[in-house]
Image: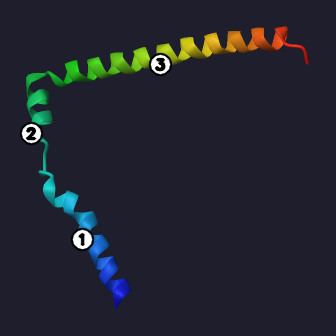
Amino acid sequence: MRKNLISAAIALLASIPAFAQPAQPEMADGFRADGKIYVVVLVLATIFAGIIALLVRLDRKMTKLEKEHFNNSQY
């Protein structure tokens, strides 16, 4: 009995977000209709490209420092 009650409570709590969301997002439809969705996509792509460039640059610097450290260390 207790397992059934806990299972029912979990199922109810898991289904609450499905009821709270509208069927279609209105904001995305408005952006798509006005053509602004492409601006949003472009901005996000630029941000992700910047993050990737930063990570690549950081990785190259770290690799260079690691090589210098291991070449100068006395093992």
Which quadrant would residue 43 be assigned to in this image? top left
Q: Looking at the picture, which amino acid does disc 3 mark?
A: Ile
| Image-based side of 37 in relation to 8, left or right | left
CB under 8 Å between callouts 1 and 3? Answer: no
The amino acid type, in three-letter code, at marker 1 is: Leu
x 15%, y 60%: residue: 19
Q: Which mark is residue 26?
A: 2
Q: Is residue 40 above or below residue 17?
A: above
Q: Identify which residue is drawn at 28% across, 64% down.
A: 14
- 56 vs 69, left or right, is left
The x, y position of residue 9, in whole percent, is 27, 75
| Residue 57, percent from left and from top | 55, 11
Mark 3 lies on residue = 52
Tell me whether the residue at label 2 lies in contact with that at label 3, contact meaning CB atoms closer than 8 angstroms: no
Q: Relative to residue 4, is residue 54 drawn left or right?
A: right
Tell me what residue is drawn at x 15 percent, y 52 percent: 21
Please state which of the two labelled residues, at mark 1 or mark 3, is closer to the viewer: 1
Which element is circle 3 on? helix
Residue under pointer 1 = 12
- Measured in 3D between alpha carbons, the distance from the residue under mark 1 to the one under mark 3, in whole angstroms, is 41 Å
Q: Residues within 10 Å of mark 3 (few under 14, many from 20)?
A: few
Q: Residue furthest right?
A: 75
**How far across and how far down the image is residue 41, in percent?**
27, 23
